Amino acid sequence: MITQTLFPKSVSEVRDALVAHSKSFKSVVMQCGHFLLYYDIVENRLLPGISSELTGSRHQRLRDELGHFPELTWKMGVDLLAAIDVPDRNVMIAVNDWQYVPDGIDRSPFYVENTVLPQYYQDALDQAGAQIKVLSPERRGGSGPESPYFSEQTLRNQYVRHIKDMIRKGMLPPDAELSEKEGLSVCNLTDILGEDREIYCSTKNANCATEVTEMIDQAYRLANCDLFINIFPSVCQQFVEVGSEIPYRLFNSPVSRIINIAMPARRVSSFDDLMDGAQYSVHDMVE
């Protein structure tokens, strides 16, 4: 449940809050540097919506609209990780590869071709002055270099398979209600406030909340983390807050504290812009 909500006005306020809220934790994973994929019809390929990676004059509008949020939140994120006293520090990058990718466009070449961080990201990581590991998604077979990016579409698909497997094995928690009628399967979970939430429906696609649930669970499996921090666009806040409550209830996730930092993503060009309307919430997983 959300145990504290703050409305910080500066990066230093965020840093002070994180320092206070990360005491005694052993391993942290932070999601930051989030960006979208943009289909460039001229080059016939998907490009990362990151300002320094969009070099064509035709990309100016995208750079201005959404291209600076990834770099600003990455720089802020790795500097914040360097400032907190947690022995094991990890970072991961979620990619919005569904919202602006046209139907029929194959996403996989982007992840095959992009196996290293953009130069801006690598430079900021080096300058942070701390040992921070960059997580890569769980391998599903195959060989070759790993991409450092977590596909949101893949997370959604993995969540659906995760739930189907739990249903098949009878591993749903006792307070999860499963109903089946005329080939339709629906699973509801009683949240920590006693309200029923639909967490799976066989006729519906997974959504932003469920991809957050899967991302947190994978962060634990990859880094054995007990603290998860997520820096994300404010427009996603409702889904992120809901998705943050599900891993503990559904997967019995050992991640005991989740800190969500919502920030404006459009037409931002400075840290001050990010802090204009930022919201910081702490989820503590308690019975």
Image (cartoon, rainbow, N blue to C red):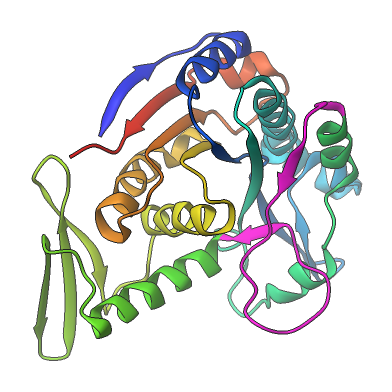
Quadrant position of the C terminus in the picture: top left
Within the image, what quadrant is residue 14 found in? top right
Query: Which residue corresponds to the image point at 47% horizontal and 33% vertical from the top-left?
Result: 234
Horizontal arrangement in the rendering, residue 148 relative to residue 187 (left or right): right
Q: Residue 46 versus residue 31: which sits nearer the camera? A: 31
Q: Quadrant of residue 99?
A: bottom right
Give the magenta-colored segment's residue range.
127-151
Which residue is depicted at the point 80% across and 40% down? 51
**Point 86% across, 38% down: residue:** 120
Q: Position of residue 141 (x, y in %)?
A: 67, 83
Is residue 194 located in the magenta-colored stretch of the structure?
no
Q: Position of residue 70 (x, y in %)?
A: 70, 38
Counting from the top left corner in percent of width and height, residue 21 is at: 45, 21
Residue 140 in magenta stretch: yes
Q: Nearer the viewer, residue 1 or 106?
A: 1
Prevailing secondary structure class for the magenta stretch in the rendered image: loop
Residue 265 on image: x %, y %: 59, 33
Residue drawn at x 17%, y 73% as measured from the top left: 186
| 278 vs 105: above or below | above
